[in-house]
Amino acid sequence: MTHSEKVLQILRSVGEKGIHSFDLGHSVGTWRVAARIHDLKKRGHNIVSVPEPKGNMVGCRYFLNEITK
């Protein structure tokens, strides 16, 4: 499974609470989270990012907006 696929899987599992970029990177095993989010957006996934500091780090919280049929 690629890092992008892992990111998508995690975004689906966390639901509407979203996940902070630091936690997402740690879970996936990459610090290139923004690049993976960019790849997923190019593939048509609706991912929203909201700036959110965590301690003394700058980051954001990611949310996946998918319409279930």
Image (tube, grey):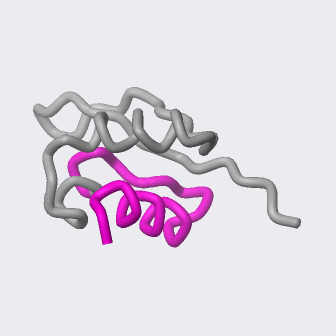
Quarter placement of the C terminus:
bottom right
Residue 47: horizontal and vertical position, in percent? Answer: 56, 40
Q: Residue furthest right?
A: 69
What is the quadrant of residue 15 in the picture?
A: bottom right
Q: Residue at x 54, y 57 (%)?
A: 17
- Residue at (40, 54) in percent of width and height: 19
Q: Position of residue 34 (x, y in %)?
A: 30, 35
Which residue occupies the foreground of this view, 26 or 17?
Answer: 26
What secondary structure is the magenta-colored segment mainly? helix
Provide residue 67's location: percent of width, then percent of height.
Answer: 80, 55
Residue 5 among those drawn in magenta:
yes
| 68 or 42: nearer the viewer | 42
Left of 2 or right of it: where is 49?
right
Note whether 69 is above or below 39 in the view shown. Answer: below
Q: Which residues are magenta?
A: 1-23
Whether residue 61 is in magenta: the answer is no
Q: Is residue 63 found left or right of 60 in the rendered image?
A: right
**In the rendered view, would you say 57 is above or below 32?**
above
Q: Is residue 2 left or right of residue 48?
A: left
Q: Quadrant of the N terminus?
A: bottom left
36 sits left or right of 64 in the view: left
Task: Please tell me which residue is depicted at 35% across the width and 33% down the height of the picture.
Answer: 52
Count the labels in the image. 0
In the picture, residue 32 is in which quadrant?
top left
Q: Residue at x 55, y 65 (%)?
A: 12
